[in-house]
Amino acid sequence: MQTDITGRLLICCPDRPGIVAGVSQFLFTCGANILDASQHSTDPKEGLFFMRMVFHLENTLVTMEELEKQFQEKVAAPLKMEWRIDYTSHRKKMAIMVSRYDHCLMELLWRWRSGELPVDIPLVISNHEDLRKLTEDFGIPFHYLPVNAENKAEREKEAIQLIQDAKADFTVLARYMQILSPSFVSTFPGKIINIHHSFLPAFAGANPYKNAYTRGVKLIGATAHYVTDDLDEGPIIDQDVARVSHRHAVNDLVMLGRDIERQVLTRAVVAHVEDRVIVHGNKTIVF
């Protein structure tokens, strides 16, 4: 039995007095030390409360299962909470899907190898062979699943099986230029992160840099979001922008945009890995 437990508790519930006190008192009676706490209340009309609390139990005889059972009975049920506890002892596994563009993949692999991204990467899946050597140079298995209109459903089943066999906790679309089917998305609800090369909701879909140039925008950006059945409309985790002008050609926008994509995707992945994201409807609270 693990005697030291560090947990990250995420909560969403109707707002009311006593929530923080109730959670804190429960953890105190368990002998836990609270390491970090953040909270957010919505406006009174919506009336919701969100909280992230990191706690540590040292030399405890309470198991994770017992801790969660007691929390549900004593705190969560009376306060009508939606909640989860993730434990730092579990190192998350991140699957990556990518097509031909290498910049987002390379950013994730560099940060993983340097220790900045505390995950395991059991596999990379691609519909092109271009990035095989790059991936395998990092010692990561590369799976080539070419996709066309006739085999798309079958290839998705293969990809799902590979991700499940690897026991991946979540999947990152590092510029994977295929639209995932509702069947694929529903297999991993809230577990797929995509990077889109525009500041959503502007210029969803294909060719956003060309569309931005045509429209003469003064800002371009990138958006990391959870994938849903609605194309590029899932809950947004992170975004950023850069200023541009009439002097920038489409290729300039692409070059600037790729830098933003790398940074935004990395921040979103780190937030997800550190259990700092609560999804509520089509919005997120990121602590």
Image (tube, rainbow, N blue to C red):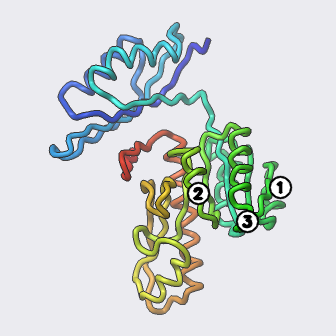
In which quadrant of the rendered image does the C terminus lie? top left
> Which residue appears farthest toward the front when viewing the image?
150
The three-letter code of the residue at mark 3 reads Glu
Q: Residues within 10 Å of mark 2 (few under 14, many from 20)?
A: few
Kindly check if marks 1 and 2 are in contact, taking CB atoms under 8 A apart as contact. Answer: no
Closer to the camera in the image, 269 or 15: 15
Closer to the camera in the image, 153 or 201: 153
Q: Which residue is mark 3?
A: 150
Closer to the camera in the image, 180 or 151: 151
Q: Residue at x 41, y 78 (%)?
A: 219
The three-letter code of the residue at mark 1 reads Asp
Sequence order check, earlier mark of 1 and 3: 1
Q: Residue at x 57, y 69 (%)?
A: 259
Q: Which mark is residue 137?
A: 1
Q: Residue at x 21, y 24 (%)?
A: 18
Distance (Cα) linking label 3 and label 2: 14 Å
Closer to the camera in the image, 17 or 187: 187
Q: Residues within 10 Å of mark 3 (few under 14, many from 20)?
A: few
Q: Which mark is residue 181?
A: 2
Give SS at disc 2.
loop
